[in-house]
Image (spheres, grey):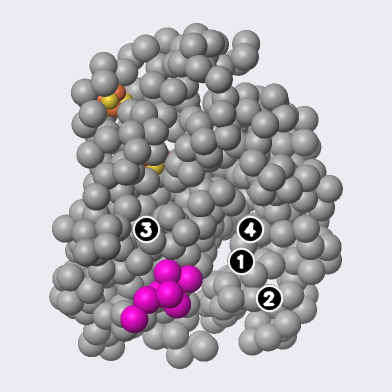
Amino acid sequence: MEKLKDLEQEMLKCVRCGKCRDTCRTLLETDEEGDLVPTWESRSSRGRVRMALGLVQEKIPSTPRLIQDFYNCLLCNRCVSTCPSGVDVPKIIEGVRGFIVGEDLAPPNVKALLQALDETRNIFEMDQDERLIWTEMEAEEIMEDKVLKEADLCFFVGCQASFKGSLAGIPEAIALILDSLNINFTVLGEEEWCCGNPYFLLGLENEKAKELVSHNIEKMQELKVKQILTTCPGCFRVWTKIYPKIWGQPLPFEIIHSTQFFSELIDKNHINIPKKLQQIVGYQDPCELGRHCGIYEEPRKILNHLAGSNFKELPLNRDDSNCCGGGGLAKAVAEKMTLEIARFKLHEFLDIGSNLLVTACPACYENLMRGLDQSEEKIEIKDVNQLLAELLDLS
Ligand code: SF4
Ligand code: SF4
């Protein structure tokens, strides 16, 4: 409770105007006519801030229902961009999540996820030596001499893209592009530990989390790395915003997202794709890349290069974009809700006439694909790196 008490002033900044409530995606659900209607206030940003204050002032108990509504937040930051009082709602929610874990009241799936992370250093409870499964297909030859080698550039693959077969095409595309440009790089392989994001999304900056941070930094130092390339916005956010804080000093490497890396190469004419895409392409702003880290223009630069005037913006884009539903570990407690949000997101693309949805985040890709599997809609979903590799005739 001590730690949560520190956030009380942040909670008191809320004047209950409800502006954030209007944009909090978890508040809405689809009714029988297919229209979006508000559900319980406790599923909104304002409701969560009020409940947090009630908890901290010991006016309300931590019931299972209340607990559920702190874990089904997407941590998308949309409320932060709408709040006129500058309330950091996600920080409050992470604080409550940490308090709930500390009281041993976390939902079973959250506990299981933490246990897996503590024991196996990834949330999938897989052996670390399976981190290189993605290298066993098209990029096999390229990756033969790339594991734990000294190099200026290290590709930090991330748990999702390393372990999930459905996402293997993403790191593969990055390896193929780098190789085609004769850029030397390395990967940590089984020495890559989870970046720690799940701990931070659960409000935990504990010894286990610090162990992951120190290990990953030390491995990079051993390989004399100067630049770390990520494709997962979660890894990118954590490496840029949380690692220096935990490490206690600026990191001795540059952290770069793949969209920054490749858009720079397009600028320098090292990547040039003259043939433009004929489909109408729309872009899904990943919350952790956009609202959390301010990277909006680089993915657009790539898409403008690939699609020219066929690249169309969603009406709600950049700071105002809606989450795909895949963020904040909400899936662990509210899978149905996250898929419903994904299906809603697909309609935003169909409404602008787009039949190709491009994202720059493995978690968005995964959640949107799962949403598509459950719908009748016809739309292609691609990761921006895969699209680039495809148009370079590499895959
Ligand atoms: S972070 Fe997103 S889902 Fe969570 S309260 Fe804010 S707007 Fe709602
Ligand atoms: S968090 Fe901000 S936007 Fe939301 S109700 Fe409170 S003051 Fe209004």
Question: What whole-number distance in Å separates the C-alpha atoms at marks 2 and 4?
Answer: 12 Å
Query: Mark 1 falls on what kind of element?
Result: helix
Question: Mark 1 or mark 3: which is in front?
Answer: 3
The residue labelled by disc 4 is 158
Amino acid identity at mark 2: Trp
The residue labelled by disc 3 is 341
Q: Are marks 1 and 2 in contact (CB under 8 Å)?
A: yes
Mark 1 nearby-residue class (10 Å; few <14, some 14–19, many ≥20): many
Question: What whole-number distance in Å separates the C-alpha atoms at marks 1 and 4?
Answer: 6 Å
The residue labelled by disc 1 is 161
Amino acid identity at mark 1: Ala
The spot of residue 319 in percent (x, y) is 27, 45
Residue bounds of the magenta highlight: 370-376
Q: Which mark is residue 134?
A: 2
Amino acid identity at mark 4: Gly
Question: What whole-number distance in Å separates the C-alpha atoms at marks 1 and 2?
Answer: 8 Å
Q: Are marks 1 and 4 in contact (CB under 8 Å)?
A: yes
Mark 3 nearby-residue class (10 Å; few <14, some 14–19, many ≥20): many
